[in-house]
Image (cartoon, rainbow, N blue to C red):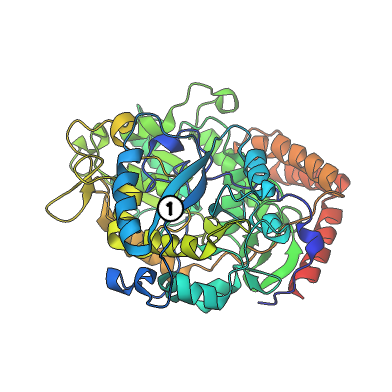
Amino acid sequence: MKKKLLATLLSASMVMGIAACGSSTADTTTSNDTAAKTETTTSDTTSTDSAASDTAAEAPAIDTSEHVVITYMTTGGAPEGNQTDAMLEQLNKILTEKVNAELEVYYIDWTDYLSNYNLTLARMDGTVDLVGTASDWLDAWPNAKNGAFLELSEDMLKTYAPKTWESVSPEHWELCKYNGEIYLMPEDNYAQWTNHGFAYRLDWAKEAGLADGVKSWDDLTTYFKYVKETYPDVIPWDSDGTQYATMVGGWITSHSNYVSIDGINAGAMWGGTKDDLYTVYSPYVTDTDSLVEFAKMMKEWDEIGVWKTDVLNNTTSDNREDFKIGRVAAEQHHTQTWTDLCSHKDGYTIYDDPNAETGFFYFGEETKNLVALSITHGAMAVSAASKNPERALMVYDLIRNDPECYKLFNYGVEGVSYEITADGMRKTPEGYNSATDGISVNYWWGRNDDLEIKDATLNWDAIEKLYKEYDAIKIDYPYGQFVPNVDDIQSKIDNINDIHTTYMKQIAFGKYTGSAEDIVAEYQAALEKAGINDVTAELQAQFDALYK
């Protein structure tokens, strides 16, 4: 990848595409869970040797004679009354022994979190050392450009974070650079998939003649028809009418090799193709025939009765919960949600039927078009104002790579916050209460599949089968270093958003009048009048400056 970066691209704060780790409930869960239960990356890295004796703590040339406190900054509310302090007490004994340091956590509450996060960094007063960051929702590149983050030389990383250095591939280190210098340590060895699709009853799909399950949008039509005819008391999909942008985006992904750019608008309406990543276009203007076919199919789904007739005003839908108890036949969301729905958990009465199975049709399955979440969707940086950057790196290397430290920081104290089953998986103890027995460190910046302990409540046979399929076809997100400067085109993007919302609500739920050809033509004419081609041209100019 060509790596020339223009500072002008980074002069504005980054547009937040996915505030994925921004759930207000994140601070009451263990850090193994993503804050919005959303977040998706599987990355190919060298396997980490977890032997504690090989950690940075025991590098003989490092002076750790002075005890220091390292402050780690993360997003989310501070814990109240849970086991975080008890966990840190045990963790700090280990950190003191290994690197003569202890860790404190500095929380940025979700209220106005981005402003407060950036203001804390801008003070440059040494308040924080390790900084959880992200290129797509926490202004990683603007903060690197503005001097808030420390340049991390190869020698520093090799000396003070050797396990992290070894585990990240050269290609991934390249994606962590601004102006040729490394600023971020990526969370690139953690399976986290937020690509969307449909969870559905696999056993019912087989009944419908789909022996391998749903593998295409046409198969979905077959499935929904069968459910409607065979199980009249079941709603195929009780949508609340909000999934219009995801639906058409999923259709395009499934019928092309389009790769969208995050962070420009909610519809992800611009991008490149797998064959030509750096030529910007909008399939919403160019892929007319495909959009017409989409509109026709959605009209057919509406006529079948896939959703309620008042879908665009359906405020009472509780589709996901209803799927768990067998009242609906499909749930449209991302892979991480499916990993829960396919698992036989307490209260999921769908599985009272011994034949019940939950499959997943992912958008892009037909064309093998799958893009992994950016490896810098979660990353760790070191504050440029840190008084102890070397020790901060040593602490991070232990938290990320040392088994004992990792388990404490991610899961808490064994026997209190979690237990290990006979087959080596993780479960909550009897009587567990997340409010009092969980931990809150919101560690989304260095999770490591080599050290993860599997959740005993999940259906790992099904999950690992799908993840293996993903790994065989995925590409890395290619635009992680691109931060669009949209000041001069924001008004046009806003108008395009409004047009997209207005028309796609009608098209994606088959609620338009007239022909599919007419509604698509009207939609595309409105986009062109709003300036979509001007936006495309401006983004192309910025791509040329960055990548060529």
Q: Is residue 177 left or right of residue 489?
A: left
Classify 10 Å Cα crowding around label 1: few (below 14), some (14-19), many (20 and above).
Answer: many
- In the depicted view, which residue is nearer to us: 246 or 151? 151
In the image, residue 344 above or below residue 513: below
Quarter of the image where one finds residue 312: top right
Q: Is residue 275 left or right of residue 450?
A: right
Q: Position of residue 205 (x, y in %)?
A: 34, 48
- In the depicted view, which residue is nearer to us: 38 or 380? 380
Q: Position of residue 221 (x, y in %)?
A: 47, 46
The amino acid type found where label 1 is placed reads Phe
Instruction: Name the outermost residue toward the left.
Output: 422
Residue under label 1: 361
Instruction: Name the outermost residue toward the top.
Output: 316
Quarter of the image where one finds residue 476: bottom right
Q: Secondary structure at mark 1?
A: strand
- Residue 207 seen in the figure: no
Q: Position of residue 281 (x, y in %)?
A: 75, 61
Instruction: Name the outermost residue toward the front.
Output: 65
Say which residue appears at 45% left-offset and 33% top-offset: 25
Q: Position of residue 513 (x, y in %)?
A: 70, 33
- Residue 107 seen in the figure: yes
